[in-house]
Image (tube, grey):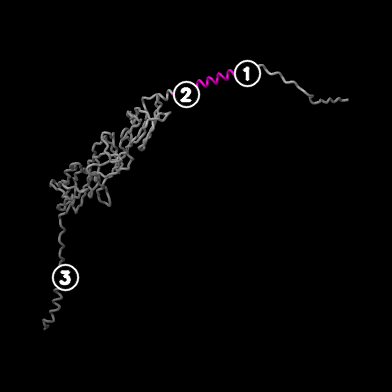
Amino acid sequence: MIHLRFLAVPLLVLVAWIGLAGPAVAAPPAPRDKTVEITTVPSTPDARFALDGVPLVTDPRGIVRFTVPRSKKPHRLELQNPTMESPGTKAEFVRWHGYGGGEQGYNPVMADLVIDRALRLQVAFRVNRVVQYSFVDQARRPVPPERIESITLRSDLGRTQTLAGGRPVLLTAVRPTLGDGQLVAKESTWSVQSVMIDGTNVVTIGEQRFRPSQVGERLEIVVLLRSAHLRVRDRLLGTPVQAVVHLTLPNGVVLPVPTDDGGEAVVNNLARGTYTVTAQGQAYAVDQELALSRSQFVDVRVLTHLDAVILTGIGVVAVTVLCGLGLWRSRLHRRRLAEPAPAPAATTGAGPREEVVVNR
């Protein structure tokens, strides 16, 4: 008879083997709820969405998260406020990113959204901002907005916008762009192409740049205005002459400028450009072209009535002298013709002897 203690060890080994060979324990089932995260670009709080009619709103960071049961059933996700306005700002929906493609990505409504996995969606907005501006000269003195005929602005994407006067304008401040597979917000840069005053451009093209997102209460634009110090002088004597100077602006408008007793006048805030200057009220005035690229002194030469008298006198004297010279030369010529011709002079002495050779 076998002792039980000899069977204890084999029995324990057998029990352990049976336990290891038993059925495997099943893994826990995968969770059926999937998380969806929607991020606005740029961050836009209070953006309103609806998933199958259930309202959703972004937090102060412009993000909203929610979970739904995993399924192949299509859902309807809608952006309910594709245009959002606040004082001075307007945000407009551009596109979805992170699911699907094609035309559906540019529609505020995604009608066939299948949530069978975790999703991260981006919603892009273009943010426009109202920009108000004022004008100053190079000395930072204000320039009245009514002098501005038009202003032309150009974005870094090549879009230009021309508007009349100093009217506020709505410009793209932030736009979405694709970088490293994600949408990112990029600030737009604009430049001043032209500011028209009196028919001429008073800024250097593209020199002044700004970002609407960073403009404060008002954008200050520097315009190039010059001054002309007019000095009317007698053309012959060089003395000052009091007169009315007609200054023709680049747009053809004539500006009368009276001088003081010393024949001088200063005209400020002139747009750089080409002008015509004429002094009126004198015996004879000549148009002078003035290229005003900087502030400068301008001498306006005129012929006065005194100059006319002097020139007339000089002309009379000159004519009298010329006539006298002509008469004197004529009389001298007639006198020479009236004198008898001199007799031919007599020949003296023998001339050279001529040899005659006779041939025999």
Q: Which residue is mark 2?
A: 314
Task: Tell me the element at label 3.
Answer: helix
Q: Is residue 321 magenta?
A: yes
> Which of label 2 and label 3 is nearer to you?
2
- Indicate the secondary structure of the residue bearing disc 2: helix
- Which tag is nearer the camera, tag 1 or tag 3? 1
Q: Is residue 115 left or right of residue 237?
A: left
Say what amino acid the circle numbered 2 marks: Ile
Residue 159 visible (yes or no): no
Residue 143 lies, in percent from the top left, at: 27, 37
Q: Is residue 160 above or below residue 341?
A: below
- For disc 1, the marked residue is 336
Q: Earlier in the sequence, mark 2 or mark 3?
A: 3
* Residue extent of the magenta highlight: 310-337
Q: Quadrant of residue 258?
A: top left
Instruction: Name which residue type carries label 3.
Output: Leu
Could you tell me the amino acid type at mark 1? Arg
Q: How would you rate the neighbour count of disc 3 (Cα within 10 Å): few for under 14, some for 14-19, many for 20 or more?
A: few
Residue 132 on the magenta segment: no
Q: Give x and y (percent) for residue 202.
A: 32, 37
Q: Is residue 3 visible?
A: yes
- The numbered mark, 1 or 3, whose residue comes first in the sequence reads 3
Q: Which is the main secondary structure of the residues drawn in magenta?
A: helix
Quadrant containing the N terminus in the rendered view: bottom left
Q: Nearer the viewer, residue 215 or 63?
A: 215
Q: Where's residue 244, x and y in %?
A: 34, 27
How far across and how far down the image is residue 260, in percent? 33, 30
The residue that disc 3 covers is: 20
Q: Nearer the viewer, residue 156 or 226?
A: 226
Q: Distance between the Cα atoms at labels 2 and 3?
A: 139 Å
The image shows residue 127, relative to residue 238, as above or below, that is below
With respect to residue 81, does 257 lie above or below?
A: above
